[in-house]
Amino acid sequence: MSTLEELKLLRKRLSDALKRSQDEAKSQKLKENLAKVYKNMATKVSHTDFTKAIEYSKYIIDLTPKQSPGYLTIGKILQEHNKDDAALKMYQIGLKRCPEGDEMRHILQSQAEKVQERLDNATKVDSSQKTQRSSKTPPTESGSAAPEIAPKVCADPMTTLPAEVVENIFNHVPFRAIVRSMRVSKTWKTTIESMRHVWNSQINFSAAHKDRPVPSKTMERYFKLATRTPPTTDLEELKHAKNNIRVVNLLGMHTKSQDYAITLWLGAFWFSIESMHLSLDMINTIKLTSHLKNRAELIPEHRASPSETITHLKLFCASPNVDVLIRHILTCMPKLTSLEVMNHHGKRSLYIDTPEPLQAPLCLTNLRVEDRTASLGRESTHNAYREVANIVEQCSDTLTSLSLSTIPIEYTRPLSKLTHLELAESNHLMEMRYLPNFMAKLQHVKLDHHHTAHFLNSLTKSTSLHQLKSLHLDLRGSPRLGSILVPSRVQDLFNLSLPSLEALSFTNYMSNVIPGWFDLLTDRLPSLIHLDVTNCKLRDIELNALTKKNKLPNLQFIGLMNTEVTGGTLISLARRGVGMDITGLDIRTDTFRWLSYESEVSLKKVSEVMLVPGYHH
């Protein structure tokens, strides 16, 4: 043998040895990986975790695609979860891929045969049951052919229902649910995006996450769906554009999201929006007020036009001067019919005098102003709310709902159409000399202790309260008039005719109740449903009249928080089926247990029930 032949033989031997070592390394690595997979399946996968077990079985097949263990494992898992069809398919795939010399191929073949036999037996049983059911048909129908049962098909309501019906359904669906519905399928997404009336009737981000902003692209997309046009700052183009966003709700949104909506979108679509609900922090309030101020300054010079479509505005803000803010709002939105401003400015700041009140005609029917500004002193109170006083005077013929909190103004004209009145936390007594002139129209009244004495003192024998449905009075008594007038005036109130009163609240009366109050109450208030006597000095003897079944037949709830009522009266009321608030009562444990678990009445909080009917903030 020559030297060349020896070298070729040596190279072949070396290559064969290298190949054998590589194959051994691969097989060793494969064994290690398989051992890890089997160990994880045994220790980390529970018996009920079907998805994880299938994933690990797929790992085994990926590692050994031409060996039987992976297919046997996944087939066994499918059989345990009553999926024999899928298990049979996996066995058949394994038989195709595994060679004839595989050690466990015969097990794979036997498992496939067993599953196939089980499926065939199940098919035979089903067919025999169908024939038995068809043989039991009545004689009159046995001669005719049995009707074929059509297979069940899952019908998509988005394609089967008429388009008008689908759009009407989504008009009553919350905004967040509409957004989620777009993720069902491409058909749903396309159909919902084409419903312009759904989008322009409500853009509501109040349910968005408070801890992170809504992406600007997402907000831009929703506004475009509502308007079908890109944003523009051309006033003439906006005035003639046929956009109609009826509601924009940004309550509780993240600061950055509100900033984007105000500066880039709401400013451009002043002429398109009919109703806005904004909740802004201090930073965004400054931006909104500056935006309103700039526009209000341009309107008298005819360099800008006011919005003629925004009719409802609800604003939570932190402005140092709520009067100036309201003036700018009304300048930019003169068509408002409902204005609600809740201003909470806790920091002390310099008082800025309000300019002359706006003289433009207004059409407000609902006005609610609440101001918590801490900077106003006694010397500046007289001129602090000149704009609010001017609004009340101008809209005296249109206002139907008035709610003022910490807004000390004086009435100079009677409010002829007022049906809802709520006054609270003023720092001086309001002059209510015109109250008897429009008292006949009032349906819902809620007054704090500053105004209760004025209200009661305005009652005369000719006072008409036939329309009154809800009355909430704080009986602590005015600091000026004193609490001496309260008992006698309350008795005068009971002597009036109150046929429609459904909700009555007397709170914070800590003097002794005059005997006969509740006897008068039961006789004069036949339609009473809710009664609240929270923080009143009441005992069982005063409430005996309410325990009789023939008194106040419509009574459903009574608030007794922090009173002196004991268990006997509570049990009598519970047997009448009257719900109660028993917070702060000194009652025995067994009485409380009986009221909570054995009686059929509900124990509720006053705040959940004693709402003014028909009046929503």
Image (spheres, rainbow, N blue to C red):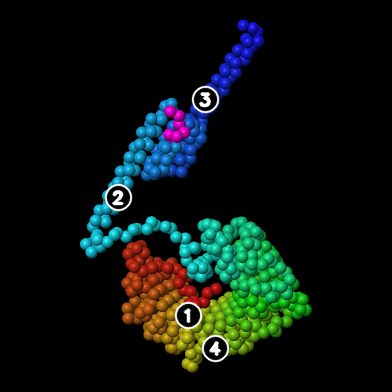
Return the x and y of residue 564 as percentages of the image width and height: 41, 72
For disc 1, the marked residue is 470
Q: Are marks 3 and 4 in contact (CB under 8 Å)?
A: no
Q: Nearer the viewer, mark 1 or mark 3?
A: 3
In terms of depth relative to the viewer, which is nearer, 378 or 599? 599
Task: Name which of mark 1 and mark 3 comes first in the sequence.
Answer: 3
Left or right of 514: which side holds 191? right
Q: Which residues are magenta?
A: 94-100
Q: Which residue is mark 2?
A: 127
Between marks 1 and 2 in the image, the one whose residue lies nearer the viewer: 2
The residue that disc 3 covers is 28
Residue 300: % across, % down = 75, 79
Q: Earlier in the sequence, mark 3 or mark 4?
A: 3
Label 1, label 4: how far apart the Cα atoms are? 16 Å
Q: Which residue is mark 4?
A: 438
Q: Amino acid at mark 4?
A: Phe
Which residue ends up furthest to the top in the rendered image?
Answer: 1
Q: Do the residues bearing badges 1 and 2 touch, measured as CB atoms within 8 Å?
A: no
Instruction: Give the number of the mark in front: 3 or 4.
Output: 3
Quick check: marks 4 and 2 in contact, CB under 8 Å? no
At label 4, counting other C-alpha atoms closer than 10 Å, the crowd grade (few under 14, some 14-19, many 20 or more) is some
